[in-house]
Amino acid sequence: MNINEKVKIFISSNIDEKFKIIREALRVLLEETGMCSVYSFEETGGSSKNLIASYMDKLDRMDLVVFLIDNKDGVNEGTLKEYKRCRELKRKCIFLFCNQDEKEQTEIQKELMGNMDREKCQDVPKLSQMAEDAYNSIINDILDIYLTYCHNTDLTHVGKHISETEINTDILSSTLVLKKSVYKNLKYTKTYLSNLIFYKQDFPKNVEVFDNLCCDLFQVIIGNKDIININFDSIKKLVLEEHSGKMKEVVSFRMEAMRFYWYGELEKSLEELVKALEIAQSAADVPKWLENDIALDLRNIQIMLDQSNNMPFWNFPKAQEILNNSEEPVYYPVIDRFSANFYENIALDMLNDKVCSPYVVRSGEVDRRLNEVIDIYAGALMYGSIANTVFIKSKLNILFQELAMRNREHKIFIFAVK
């Protein structure tokens, strides 16, 4: 996501092996949103400044500071200095305290709890949840401030808040377009993906037509089937049944562009995308994020064509200008949410694997990750997004590599290499 000005975040915690993992997981989750730039001590190189000055100067330039504190370890000298500097600069802060092994509050938490004008801190029951809870707190805080601004509320007024009803109405009106059944009724496709890396599971007895067709196209995407062997017309017909008005026209052209893309006819694919973009730009019922997503496909295919013709592509095409000039911060609400959950859960799985006892057995998490991949695929397909269907391979790449590192299963290793 191309966001010019990002929220600069400083992660403060004790420096040890367990917090190194937590800080890295949190950094990856936040930067994956595309709207955060994260300073983490482990990621910095050498400096001509002394150790304390090198990171304290960074703190001075941050928008938000996140304190991760384990009650058992307490607050070390470095974290205490960062806390005091934040107070001097009146910097925005978020505090999380893990009470897994020690319920007694630290002095910082007692200070926060005893002053209604201070930040609301959060208790975290498990160290393995620290990165996930911090991520949720940060994103919710950013959204809360944005929504407060949108509702013309004085940001300095303590006591005013956005109600849950207002938040849900504001967000869902622009994102919840497809029925949940689209994602829930893909059991056949999900079973197929699971069978790729596990021993064979039984497919569901009653398979819906759309589920079967989705599985066919999914096999094309991962290279297990040729496009000429699937019924793309039926896929397009069923996808269009979910839309109406100008949105239906736009998605129709995008589906044709997708068909030509997988057939390797990039010029024809480009022509269909140009038609889709023209309608999207003139139609009031087509959201801006969808126009951006069409422009993303246009840009990518134009670059592919330029490369195949040995033409320079450093002068970005018109589609890139649309993306650069757009004020819309969201590219694809449904996919963005699913993708954020997917990457967040993978990071959490890896963190749990590091901090949990070797005698703990966890089950079902791999199936859940695979199901999340299919949910992302379904969301991409229902709007005819070429880029987001192609990105399915990169998500599988990340997932299979992570599984290969944690499991001694040769079949998983083979697909990670593939």
Image (cartoon, grey):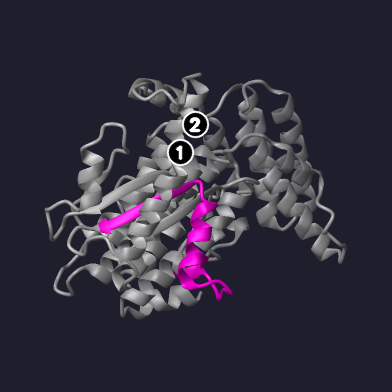
Question: Which of the numbered marks, if any, corresponds to residue 142?
Answer: 1
- 264 displayed left or right of 192: right
Outermost front residue: 88
Q: Which residues are magenta?
A: 42-69
Q: Nearer the viewer, residue 209 or 251?
A: 251
Q: Residue at x 23, y 47 (%)?
A: 109
Q: Is residue 75 left or right of residue 313?
A: left
Residue name at image x 51 percent, y 50 percent = 62
Distance from disc 1 to disc 2, alpha carbons, whole Å, reads: 6 Å
- Please report contact status of discs 1 and 2: CB closer than 8 Å, yes or no: yes
Which residue corresponds to the image point at 34% horizontal and 56% vertical from the top-left?
131
Q: Which mark is residue 146?
A: 2
Q: Residue at x 55, y 65 (%)?
A: 223
- Residue 247 placement, left or right of 369: right
Q: Amino acid at mark 2?
A: Tyr
Q: Is label 2 in a helix, a strand or a loop?
A: helix
Question: What x and y, as percent, mark residue 302?
Answer: 78, 53
